[in-house]
Image: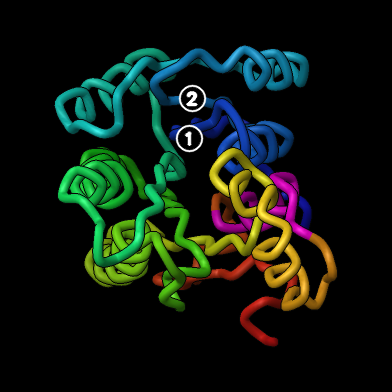
Amino acid sequence: MTDMFNLSGKVAIVTGARTGIGQGIAEGLAEAGADIVGAGHAPMPETEAYISGLGRKFVYYDIDLGKQDKIQALVDDTIKTFGRLDILVNNAGIIRRQDVLDFSEENWDDVISMNLKSLFFLSQACARYMKDNGGGKIINIASMLSFQGGIRVVSYTASKSGVTGVTKLMANELAKYNIQVNAIAPGYIATNNTDALIKDPKRSAEILGRIPADRWGKPEDLKGAAVFLASRASDYVSGHVLAVDGGWLAR
């Protein structure tokens, strides 16, 4: 059974792997045996040091995922470097907070471009390779706001609702090529993106009061779900959004 979760010999692109959820997922995939390409706008020395310490390979790829001009080059260079590409984790994302009546076009466009547009076109580029090379795994990072409205983050909510739709559509079209497309919907995880909420005593207390696990999540809480969806253990799982939320949605 443990062999079903073994990622030895696999190569994964993980976007936004410098800190937080992306870092936790990249480390988890490497712990299961995968080599990692960390794609983002800033070097990832801590992630690289951890993965290298496991005896796995790590390559940092400098890319602004708010734009789409380097997406194909990222895929091509990964294949040139490692000779293969098996897993894509679309984790990179941004959030902008502003009341809905004042929300700016810039805050809308920036979030949608990174969180949804780049996610789709990177998935497309990877899927084109995977289709001709035996299949692969695409894991998108959704959110609790894929299911709920939230407040003061309208473009983020729109983007993460879109992620669930894109995940299901791509799963429908790509399953016949042995490409499984799924998503993880993290609950409230202590990261840079949630720092403002954690520092707001009222909001933090409200959030914590609804989590049955009685704690904020940690990036390492996503490792198991990511390894499952990246491995042979999930070969018949397609178009699913897996909540890792400490019970938030069940409350």
> x, y (%) of residue 128?
21, 43
Left or right position of 8 against 240:
right
Q: Residue furthest bottom?
A: 251
Q: Which of the pair 229/16 is nearer the observer?
A: 16
Task: Please say whether residue 228 is one of the residues in the magenta stretch.
Answer: yes
Q: Residue at x 76, y 58 (%)?
A: 216
Position above or below: 45 against 119: above
Q: Which residues are magenta?
A: 216-229
Q: Are marks 1 and 2 in contact (CB under 8 Å)?
A: yes
Q: Residue furthest right?
A: 214
Left or right position of 119 against 109:
right
Q: Which of the pair 229/9 is nearer the observer?
A: 229
Q: Secondary structure at mark 1?
A: strand
> x, y (%) of residue 116?
27, 52
Q: Residue at x 82, y 62 (%)?
A: 215
Q: How many marks?
A: 2
Q: Does residue 131 show up?
A: no
Colour scheme employed for the rendering of this structure: rainbow
> x, y (%) of residue 67?
20, 31
Q: Which residue is mark 1?
A: 14
Question: Is the C terminus in the top left, top right, bottom left or bottom right quadrant?
Answer: bottom right
Alpha carbon distance from label 1 to label 2: 5 Å
Q: Which residue is mark 2?
A: 38
> x, y (%) of residue 135?
36, 49
Amino acid beneath label 1: Val
Position above or below: 179 against 24: below
Q: Residue at x 54, y 26 (%)?
A: 36
Q: Which of the pair 144/208 is nearer the observer?
A: 208
Q: Residue at x 69, y 48 (%)?
A: 199
